[in-house]
């Protein structure tokens, strides 16, 4: 794939500025979503926000850690895909839609059963062609889902894009402990503590906030909450079992993995160049700049570089159909 170079102006070559600026200052015209609530097999629910243009093809877009469908990066991608003739379903993971989910569990980096529920729901909504797009944690979910299912992915799923993805969560847990990442740790922990407090009020006999006194990092949070709530033995067990990196060789859907080389959240193991070099379905691009879910370089329509690239990749895959890696 010929990708136009990412050439941000000088300030946005800084990893932290390109990461923080879009979160605080990017203004995307609000998407007029139509919300649909779908029931999960375990009796919980997922809230899906639709932006339709009357297309026969749809993209399922999944946010990152403590995100939702209204984040600027989500709405920017939704608008870019709408502009290219895609209906878009923006998925809010469990507990992220503004309404607490029903179960003790919420979302996590390996909950591909919820991706499966969402994919099948969109697939059954009369769309002949589907694409998956995921940011950060959502990107890991997309890659893990596709890798787990291999040739059993629904044939309608023709392409995927994963952006700023911590494909090796154990390595990224270490990367987030770097001194320069303290502001991100504080922000995520503040949001995650609030989620646990809400769960403790909802299930006072099953969860406690007592462990807050011992939490100084995301690894600590995952050790005390994410892992035990979701059936993992420890944070290390969680990171090992849900990372998408070992599953990349099993991809059969044409997939673009876009990880900036200066992403402050990612470890060296999150740039699987050797896997991509011998893989017909995986395209890896590691531009020098971009930060984490940043890629600040707007075109005349206001699209960021990553949104333009995602649209180009999806169109290239559709134009090249049938896909290069055969599936039944």
Image (cartoon, grey):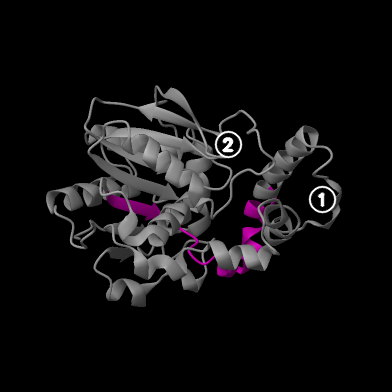
Res 272 quadrant in image: bottom left
Tell me if I can see residue 178 in this picture.
no
Which residue, given by chain and number where applicable, does mark 1 sit on? 212
Relative to 167, does residue 304 appear above or below in the rendering? Answer: above
Q: Position of residue 319 (x, y in %)?
A: 13, 49
x then y, percent, for residue 255: 30, 58
Q: Earlier in the sequence, mark 2 or mark 1?
A: 2
Magenta residue span: 158-186
Observer-nearest of 280 and 8: 280
Camera-nearest residue between 244 and 16 = 244
Q: What residue is rendered at 34% in x and 34% in y?
A: 88
- Residue drawn at (61%, 28%), measured in percent from left and top? 99
- Labels 2 and 1 touching (C-beta < 8 A): no
Image coordinates for residue 199, horizontal then vertical, percent: 74, 38
- The image shows residue 125, relative to residue 22, as above or below, that is above
Query: Percent position (x, y) of residue 326?
Result: 20, 61
Please tell me which residue is depicted at 41% across the width and 58% down the height of the picture.
Answer: 143
> Mark 2: which secondary structure?
loop
Determine which of the numbered discs, if any, sits on residue 108 in the image: none
**Image position of 238 (left or right of 301):** right
- The answer to whether residue 162 is magenta is yes
In the picture, the quarter occupied by the C terminus is bottom left
**Is residue 190 in sight in this rendering?**
yes
Please identify the quadrant where the N terminus is shown: bottom left
Residue 96 got which mark?
2
Q: Is residue 258 magenta?
A: no
Q: Left of 145 or right of it: where is 181?
A: right
Q: For the residues marked 2 and 1, what is the alpha-carbon distance in whole angstroms?
A: 21 Å
């Amino acid at each position: 794939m010929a990708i136009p170079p990412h050439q941000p102006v000088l300030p946005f070559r800084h990893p932290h500025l390109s990461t923080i600026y879009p979160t605080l200052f990017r203004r995307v015209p609000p998407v007029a979503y139509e919300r649909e609530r779908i029931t999960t097999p375990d009796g919980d629910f997922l809230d899906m926000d639709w932006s339709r243009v009357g297309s026969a093809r749809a993209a399922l877009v999944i946010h990152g850690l403590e995100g939702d469908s209204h984040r600027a990066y989500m709405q920017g991608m939704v608008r870019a895909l709408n502009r290219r003739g895609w209906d878009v379903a923006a998925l809010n993971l469990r507990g992220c839609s503004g309404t607490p989910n029903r179960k003790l569990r919420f979302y996590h980096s390996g909950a591909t059963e919820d991706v499966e529920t969402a994919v099948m729901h969109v697939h059954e909504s009369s769309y002949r062609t589907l694409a998956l797009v995921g940011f950060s944690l959502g990107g890991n979910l997309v890659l893990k889902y596709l890798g787990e299912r291999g040739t059993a992915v629904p044939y309608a799923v023709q392409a995927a894009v994963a952006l700023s993805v911590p494909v090796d969560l154990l390595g990224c847990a270490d990367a987030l402990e770097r001194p320069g990442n303290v502001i991100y740790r504080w922000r995520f922990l503040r949001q995650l503590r609030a989620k646990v407090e809400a769960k403790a009020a909802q299930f006072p006999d099953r969860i406690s906030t007592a462990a807050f006194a011992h939490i100084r990092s995301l690894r600590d949070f995952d050790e005390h909450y994410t892992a035990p709530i979701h059936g993992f033995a420890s944070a290390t067990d969680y990171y090992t079992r849900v990372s998408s990196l070992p599953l990349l060789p099993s991809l059969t859907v044409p997939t673009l993995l876009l990880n900036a080389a200066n992403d402050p959240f990612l470890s060296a193991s999150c740039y699987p160049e050797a896997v991509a070099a011998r893989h017909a379905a995986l395209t890896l691009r590691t531009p020098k700049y971009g930060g984490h879910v940043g890629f600040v370089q707007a075109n005349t329509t206001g699209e960021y570089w990553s949104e333009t690239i995602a649209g180009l990749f999806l169109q290239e895959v559709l134009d090249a159909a049938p896909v290069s890696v055969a599936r039944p």
